[in-house]
Image (spheres, rainbow, N blue to C red):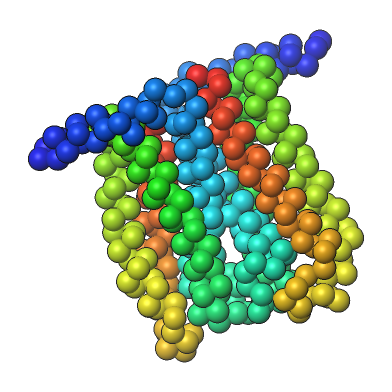
């Protein structure tokens, strides 16, 4: 693939070598990555459940989403930083790993949907969103983020 | 029979052995465990953050707590069942793992913390339900829960490293 040289270069950076040389850094990064996931997915799943009409129905969508957005952002930044470091330390393993590829197929659309559709629809009043559109975005968001999680978990198994 | 022997017997049972030796079972159960964890601990953390007054301050505490609870319980049940199956397949290994013991201690502390809250302050929640600033004891409950669940996750993840 065209990006193999890039992945090789990632694999040889000093950060990458440093993480590999340590017994604990990778494991610590993985734990922090998992904590970030609980924050990111915990908050997004609450918003998606609200969009689907399955939870927090006593509150308007926009209020739930506005209150939880900072939590999602903290989770997302934590995941991106630790995830990038984990990736750097085993870029070549990731290159040949189907789980990693699936994770990326879900991650990039997931980020795109989150920062466009998801953020804009959750700013509107419930009446403006209507009965169908909110459910479509909620399902799409849930599907993409759990796709990321499943792909990520699979990296360690395949 | 010592506790270790009991664990060894659980691990050697036909269910334990078949999970351990199957190519797909262990990864699938582990995945279900992570998804259950995400939903249940994710929702618990959102409630904790409301308890300490960090988020959702405009919403009544009971609205947050009651509306998230069904999903929290659903996630917890799937986490608990999948966790029990994982334990079944490597009970003796878990017994000898120090990090697994710490994880279980955090899990019990999280349970005790929740139980104490539900039977005391949680029962009187109607009196402070609407206030953005929660009582000190509610804040302490929230922090204790955040710490305990972080401990469960960190030491749970670490257990898998230790047992390779």
Across and down, in percent, residue A57 comes to 59, 76
Query: Compared with residue A68, is residue A5 higher up or lower down, i.e. above or below?
Result: above
Quadrant in the picture for residue B101: top right
User: What residue is at 24 percent from the left and 29 percent from the top?
Assistant: A12
Name the residue rendered at 72%, 64% in the picture.
B51
Q: Residue furthest front?
A: A14
Would you place residue B17 above or below residue A3 in this image?
above
Q: Nearer the viewer, residue B119 or A81?
A: A81
Q: Residue furthest bottom?
A: A127
- In which quadrant is the N terminus of chain A drawn? top left
Q: How many marks?
A: 0
Q: Residue at x 44, y 56 (%)?
A: A76
Q: Position of residue B39 (x, y in %)?
A: 56, 53
Please indicate, yes or no, whether residue B30 appears anywhere in the rendered image: no
Q: Does the rendering let one see residue A8?
A: yes
Left or right: residue A122 versus residue B43 is: left
B86, B137: nearer the viewer: B137
Nearest to the observer: residue B53 or residue A104: B53
User: Residue, x 63% and y 56% (percent of image)?
Assistant: B45
Furthest residue toward left: A2
Horizontally, is A60 left or right of B72 in the view? left
The part of the image, by quadrant, that contains residue B153 is top right
Q: Residue A41, position in %: x, y? A: 49, 56
The quarter of the picture where residue B152 lies is: top right
A122 lies left or right of A92: right
- Picture coordinates of residue B5, whole percent (x, y): 74, 11
- In this rendering, the answer to whether A23 lies above or below A69 is above
Image quadrant where one finds the C terminus of chain A: top left
């Amino acid at each position: 693939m065209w990006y193999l040289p890039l992945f090789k270069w990632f694999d040889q950076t000093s950060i990458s070598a440093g993480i590999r040389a340590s017994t604990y850094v990778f494991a610590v990064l993985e734990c922090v990555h998992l904590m970030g996931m609980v924050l990111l997915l915990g908050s997004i799943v609450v918003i998606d459940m609200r969009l689907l009409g399955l939870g927090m129905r006593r509150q308007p969508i926009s209020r739930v989403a506005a209150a939880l957005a900072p939590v999602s952002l903290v989770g997302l930044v934590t995941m991106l930083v630790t995830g990038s470091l984990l990736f750097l330390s085993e870029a070549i393993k990731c290159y040949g790993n189907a789980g990693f590829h699936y994770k990326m197929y879900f991650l990039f659309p997931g980020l795109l949907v989150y920062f466009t559709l998801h953020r804009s629809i959750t700013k509107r009043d419930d009446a403006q969103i209507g009965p169908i559109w909110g459910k479509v975005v909620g399902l799409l968001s849930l599907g993409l983020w759990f796709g990321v999680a499943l792909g990520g978990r699979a990296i360690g198994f395949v | 029979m010592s506790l270790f022997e009991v664990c060894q017997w659980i691990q050697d049972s036909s269910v334990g052995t078949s999970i351990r030796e199957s190519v797909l079972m262990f990864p699938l159960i582990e995945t279900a465990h992570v998804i259950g964890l995400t939903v249940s601990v994710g929702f618990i953390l959102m409630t904790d953050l409301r308890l300490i007054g960090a988020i959702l301050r405009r919403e009544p505490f009971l609205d947050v707590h009651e509306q998230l609870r069904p999903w929290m319980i659903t996630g917890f049940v799937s986490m608990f069942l999948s966790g029990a199956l994982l334990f079944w397949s490597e009970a003796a290994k878990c017994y000898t793992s120090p990090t697994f013991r710490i994880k279980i201690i955090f899990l019990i502390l999280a349970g005790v913390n929740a139980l104490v809250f539900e039977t005391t302050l949680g029962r009187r929640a109607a009196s402070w339900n609407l206030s953005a600033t929660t009582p000190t004891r509610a804040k302490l409950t929230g922090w204790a829960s955040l710490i305990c669940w972080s401990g469960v996750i960190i030491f749970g993840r670490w257990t898998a490293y230790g047992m390779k």
